Image (spheres, rainbow, N blue to C red):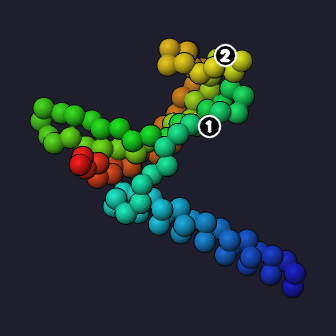
Amino acid sequence: MHHRFLAMLITIGSLVTILGCGAGAWSIQQGLIRAPIGSAQVGNLELMAFTDVEFSTVRPPRSYYTIWMTLRKDSAVRPKPWQPLLWARRLVRLEVPLARTR
C-alpha cells in the first residue's frame, strides 16, 4: 500500500516538473517571459546561459537562447574567454523573438 502511494507521489512530482519546464520553455520561446542570463561555476564545471543573435545575408536575423555546459582545464584560474576547455556541450537552443530596441 505504501509503495503504491510513494510511486504515485513520485510520478505526480515528475509530471509537474516536466510540465513546468515545458511551460517555461514555451513562454521563453513566445517572448512572454525573459530568459535568465548568467553563468555559474562549481569547480571545473561551468553552466552558461545567454541570448545571442545570428545575422545572415540570406534570411532575417534570428535570436536564440542557449545554455552551454563546459568543463574547464583549471578551476583555480578565474574564467577568461581564451581559457582552454576540456569539454563543452550545448544543452538547450531555443529560437526566441528578437529584442526590441526603444
Q: Could you tell me the amino acid type at mark 1?
A: Ala
Residue at 44%, 40% in the rendered image: 50
**Is residue 56 in view?**
yes
Residue at 59%, 21% in the rendered image: 79
Query: Circle 1 sits on which residue?
Result: 40
Query: Circle 2 sits on which residue?
Result: 77
Disc 2 residue crowd, few under 14, some 14–19, many 20+, Cα 10 Å: few
Dot 1: element: strand
Dot 2: element: loop
Residue 52 placement, left or right of 4: left
Residue 43 placement, left or right of 54: right
Q: Which of 32/45 is in front? A: 32
- Up the image or down, 72 lies above or below 99; here it is above
Q: Which of 82/22 is in front? A: 82
Gap in angstroms between the C-alphas marked 2 and 1: 15 Å
Q: Which of 11/80 is in front? A: 80
Residue at 56%, 15% in the rendered image: 84
| Percent position of residue 13, x then y | 68, 71
